[in-house]
Amino acid sequence: MKAIIPVLDESSSRPLYLQLYDHIKKEILVHEMKPDEKLPSLRSLAEKLKLSITTVNLAYSQLNVEGYIYSKPQSGYYVSNISRLSDILKEEHKGQGAMVAREGKEYSLFPVDVEKRDQSAVFQYDLSCFDFNKWKKCMNKVLTEYPQLLMFESDPQGELALRYEISKYIYRSRGVVCSPEQIVIGAGTQQITSHLCLILAKLGINHVAVEEPGYLPVKNIFRDRGFVMTAVDVDQDGIQIHRLPANIKSAVYVSPSNQFPTGAVMPIAKRYQLLEWAAHNDSIIVEDDYDSELRYFGKPIPALQGLDSHHSVVYLGSFSSTLFASIKISYMVLPEYMAEFFRDISHGYTQTCSKTEQITLALFMEQGLYQTHIRKLRQLYARKLQRVLSAINLYGKDVIRPTNTYSGINMIINVESKKEPQELCNEARQLGVAATPVSIYADDTPGRQSTALVFYYNQIPLNQMEETIQALTKIWTAES
């Protein structure tokens, strides 16, 4: 067992558990800590470093969820077997250099001084999830100080100011390495995916593998565009890579940091296996980073795109879950050669995403308001998650069994009931609560997880959580 001797800086803004996480991760990557080597126990390491057991546990938990270490019941934590060390270190170095080069170039459309039945009638909603006053101030600034920008149509690729802000943000928060020229903005993930279908066709790709279960609208788009589809089951650590097409140029649509709807997280070793599959088969990985920022225990899992050395990952992101549902601003980050393909075809398309909202969002991000909003949203949703789990334990522990309770805006619940899943969802809707059967996200699951629902708790106000869960349990257990 190797001694863990990190240099921790209590005056740093980076929490101690993340400093410890950084140290152990580096030791693993440079093979100072060998595969299957046992780590010190939580208590012994805490005593040695004069830290709390909670601090050490947070560091170990983050390493565990990302796949750098693994646990054995009643035994402890051990180092995972991670290959391709040289590629890891090369990409980390490459990513740092790319950010320096990118920040040395200005990409702003703003003047210098700026750089310095209605659903609401059906579902519950919580206005504390977003500060519309701050959004309104940014939009008013656009309307009063830059109206000339609104007199012309938006760039088919999206407003350069917003692409610049996105490129900065996703590098710092998700480890995504790109320039604004690689970003394409669209009105929602479905439109972005439609653009992607055209690019894949130009690459000679007509086959797409998708997660099972997985995000239904994207599946439908690929199917409607004539792609041959293969549904690949999702395990507790993500898509089954051994079942992906072999020796066929294809694409695979995955959400490795927070799989929808299961919440599965793909560990680091498996991410490299997926990248190797793409390189070996001359194929493309479409990474949907669905709700990855909304992780409530530890820090968000870094994006797959930042590990890619073969330019085979297309990264998808959206603001609908983190701002408000009607904003409908999504984007994709293309490898440079694919971005060229988009520019070749973009003259035949107009931008359907509101230019006013794009520029407002760029200003919202440039002023740091989006980053502040995300931090507050994580805190609010973490409290809601704890409140809903407490309410389920209090009122519905014999009826409702929750899973994937670490991130996002929803969880999967299994309901002990003789009622059909859709009937349960209809009854939840009567209380203003959104839920959908898990079965609708899979093509071949009749009878499997028949009572599993995707339960959206994020819009239930904190002060209504207990009474909502109590009423939900009562209506679900009542005879039809």
Image (cartoon, grey):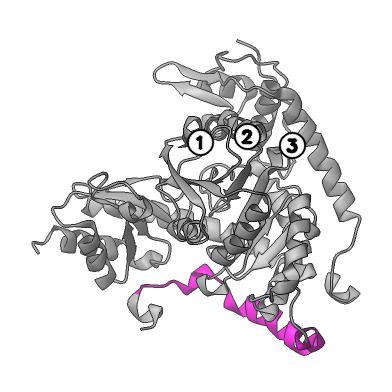
What amino acid is at disc 1?
Answer: Leu
**Disc sitting over residue 244 in the figure:** 1
Q: Position of residue 246 (x, y in %)?
A: 55, 32
Q: For the residue labelled by badge 2, is the local secondary structure a helix, a strand or a loop?
A: loop
Q: Which residue is mark 3?
A: 309
Q: The N terminus is located in which quarter?
A: top right
Q: Quadrant of residue 58?
A: top right
- Please tell me which of labels 2 and 3 falls first in the chain: 2
Drawn side of residue 466 relative to residue 41, left or right: left
Q: Which residue is mark 2?
A: 281
Contact, mark 1 vs mark 2 (Cβ under 8 Å): yes
- Please tell me which of labels 1 and 2 falls first in the chain: 1
Magenta stretch, main secondary structure class? helix
Part of the protein shown in magenta: 123-151
Drawn side of residue 22 relative to residue 321, left or right: right
What amino acid is at disc 2?
Answer: Asn
